[in-house]
Image (cartoon, rainbow, N blue to C red):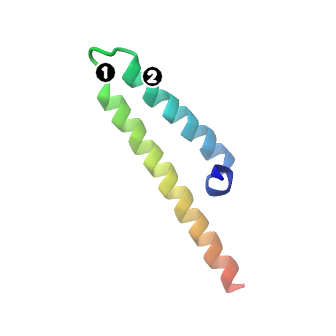
């Protein structure tokens, strides 16, 4: 399912960002690095938004043909 929504290189970037989010939270349980966590979360949201926008434009262009 994710391969249809997100390109392969974006999927790899998405996996790396999610792993980084887990490492930033669980690296130091007493004082987690929340700035890094939220920065990576923003990256995940941007990747999902970009791929959705790209797929929507591709569908619109194929419908016009």
Per the rendering, the mark at residue 32 is 1
Mark 2: give few (<14), some (14-19) or many (20+) Cα within 10 Å: some
Q: How many marks?
A: 2
> For the C terminus, which image quadrant?
bottom right
Q: Secondary structure at mark 2?
A: helix
Left/right placement of residue 38 relative to residue 16 reads: left
Specify the quadrant of the image occupied by residue 26. Answer: top left
- Residue farthest left in this picture: 31
Provide residue 44's location: percent of width, then percent of height.
Answer: 47, 44
Whether residue 36 is situated above or below residue 60 in the rendered picture: above
Mark 1: give few (<14), some (14-19) or many (20+) Cα within 10 Å: some
Residue at 67 percent across and 85 percent down: it is 64
Q: Earlier in the sequence, mark 1 or mark 2?
A: 2
Left/right placement of residue 44 relative to residue 38 reads: right
Whether residue 31 is situated above or below residue 20 in the rendered picture: above
Provide residue 17's location: percent of width, then percent of height.
Answer: 50, 35
Residue at 60 percent across and 65 percent down: it is 55
Provide residue 18's location: percent of width, then percent of height.
Answer: 50, 34
Provide residue 15's location: percent of width, then percent of height.
Answer: 57, 36
Per the rendering, the mark at residue 20 is none
Report if the CB atoms under discs 1 and 2 are less than 8 Å apart: no
Q: Of 29 and 50, which appears nearest the observer?
A: 29
- Residue farthest bottom in this picture: 64
Q: Secondary structure at mark 1?
A: loop
Per the rendering, the mark at residue 23 is 2
Q: CA distance from mark 1 to mark 2?
A: 9 Å
Residue at 67 percent across and 82 percent down: it is 63
Whether residue 48 is situated above or below residue 20 in the rendered picture: below
Residue at 37 percent across and 37 percent down: it is 39
């Amino acid at each position: 399912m994710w391969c249809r929504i997100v390109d392969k290189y974006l999927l790899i970037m998405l996996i790396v960002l999610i792993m980084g989010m887990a490492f930033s939270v669980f690296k130091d349980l007493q004082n987690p690095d929340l700035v890094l966590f939220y920065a990576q979360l923003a990256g995940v949201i941007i990747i999902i938004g970009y791929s959705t926008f790209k797929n929507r434009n591709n569908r619109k262009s194929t419908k016009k043909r």
